[in-house]
Image (cartoon, rainbow, N blue to C red):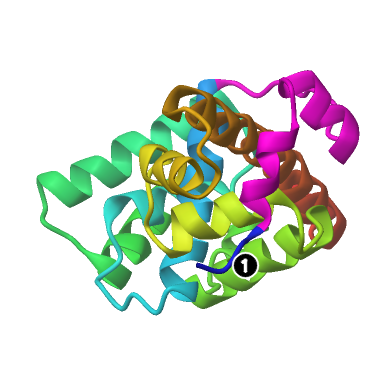
Amino acid sequence: MRHTPIFGMVNFIDDAHFRRVWKHPKKTINSRQKAWVHYMLQVWGKVNAGDDSPGGAINVIGRLMIRSQWSDDKAKQIESVVMRLYEEDGLRGDALYQKARELVIPQSSFSNIIALAKESDDAAFVERVMVKTFHRESPVRDVAIKRYCNRNCTQDIARLLNAVTGMDIQSCRRRVVWCENVLDSEIFYAMRREIEKEFPQAA
């Protein structure tokens, strides 16, 4: 089995030790911001894994959130509109995205211009942020690939770490969670910075 960066996590005593070595200061994000990150990582993983399944509601929510002025109220509105169109109207893929965009992003707003991007553009955006944020030997980047491109859950990655290193499963799981927490917060703030830089009007 090829050893990837996640296996190096056994060398860290605790979360603080891991963050100190990899220079990831503790940053907090709320549950809605975390959900947005997960939506965008799923779009990235789907495209990079070669998954050509129809775009689901979750991907559409993430794509609209990245193109709207961020607020909890706006996030709630997007989730509500998309889920109604998905569950009650039966819309899927591009049809779901187009209709939801019409309802949540006014035609006159600047956001509407950048809302025309394709899913592959969104995946490329996340990839660009990922490369800028994490070194290729980073265990966090490795966990991102395993989770979102290879479709492994936290427990799957912990089992892999356990099988290769012999560390007990709970300790392995904790180390995967440390990486996931860093991934969520670092990617959230990195995406916000990129959006503000590329589209100042949308910030």
Image spot of residue 166 (x, y percent): 50, 38
Q: Nearer the viewer, residue 80 or 13?
A: 13
Asked whether 116 falls inside the magenta stretch, the response is no
Question: What type is the residue that disc 1 sits on?
Answer: Ile
The total number of labels drawn is 1
For the point 80% across and 53% down, the residue is 133
Left or right position of 97 against 146 = left
Asked whether 8 falls inside the magenta stretch, the response is yes
Q: Which residue is mark 1?
A: 113
For the point 48% across and 35% down, the residue is 35
For the point 49% across and 44% down, the residue is 38
Q: In this picture, is 189 found above or below 12?
A: below
Q: In this picture, is 26 found above or below 51?
A: above
For the point 59% across and 21% down, the residue is 30
Image spot of residue 15 (x, y percent): 72, 22
Q: Nearer the viewer, residue 25 or 96?
A: 25
Q: In this picture, is 84 found above or below 99?
A: above
Quarter the C terminus occupies:
top right
Image spot of residue 55 (x, y percent): 30, 65
Dot 1 crowding, Cα within 10 Å, few <14, some 14–19, many 20+: few
Q: Examine the rendering and report whether any part of residue 67 can be seen.
A: no
Q: Secondary structure at mark 1?
A: helix
Image spot of residue 182 (x, y percent): 69, 35
* Residue span colored magenta: 5-30
Left or right position of 32 against 192 = left
